[in-house]
Amino acid sequence: MFVRKLSIERVDAAGKRHPCPLHWIDNFAMRNFTNDAIFDDTLPRGDGLMEAGHRVPLDRLQPAMEEWFRRKGYIKADERIEIVEPDR
């Protein structure tokens, strides 16, 4: 089910990339108790790493994750999240 390997990084205001800490990614994955079942096929694996099933749309995952990280205070207004599937 979790066949896609994803890299999740915070890009700071200067453009420098930082792997998102595991507890951020895990916090987002646990939020599925609140509504969007489309992200249930995700599995945090480590700092900056997540596995996902094929039905998880990256074009929805990135903005949802970024919004969640902002609400939690993990990223600032001038920072962003970038999700890449390295094997593609």
Image (cartoon, rainbow, N blue to C red):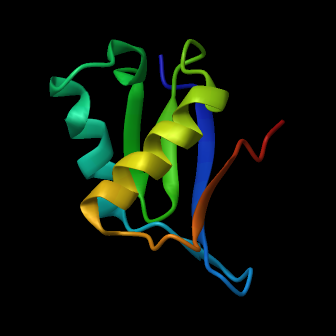
Residue at image location 74% in from the left, 80% down from the top: 15
Q: Is residue 46 left or right of residue 31?
A: right
Furthest residue in direction left, as rendered:
33
Between 23 and 33, the residue placed more toward the observer is 33
Furthest residue in direction front, as rendered:
77
Q: Position of residue 37 (x, y in %)?
A: 33, 14
Q: Quadrant of residue 22?
A: bottom left
Q: Is residue 17 above or below residue 20?
A: below
Q: Is residue 7 left or right of residue 36?
A: right
Quadrant in the picture for the C terminus: top right
Q: Position of residue 39 (x, y in %)?
A: 40, 24
Residue at image location 46% in from the left, 74% down from the top: 76
Exactly how many numbered labels are in the figure?
0
Residue at image location 58% in from the left, 74% down from the top: 78
Q: Is residue 4 left or right of residue 86?
A: left
Furthest residue in direction bottom, as rendered:
14
Q: Is residue 59 above or below residue 63?
A: above
Q: Is residue 6 above or below residue 32?
A: below
Q: Position of residue 45 (x, y in %)?
A: 41, 50
Q: Position of residue 12 (x, y in %)?
A: 61, 79
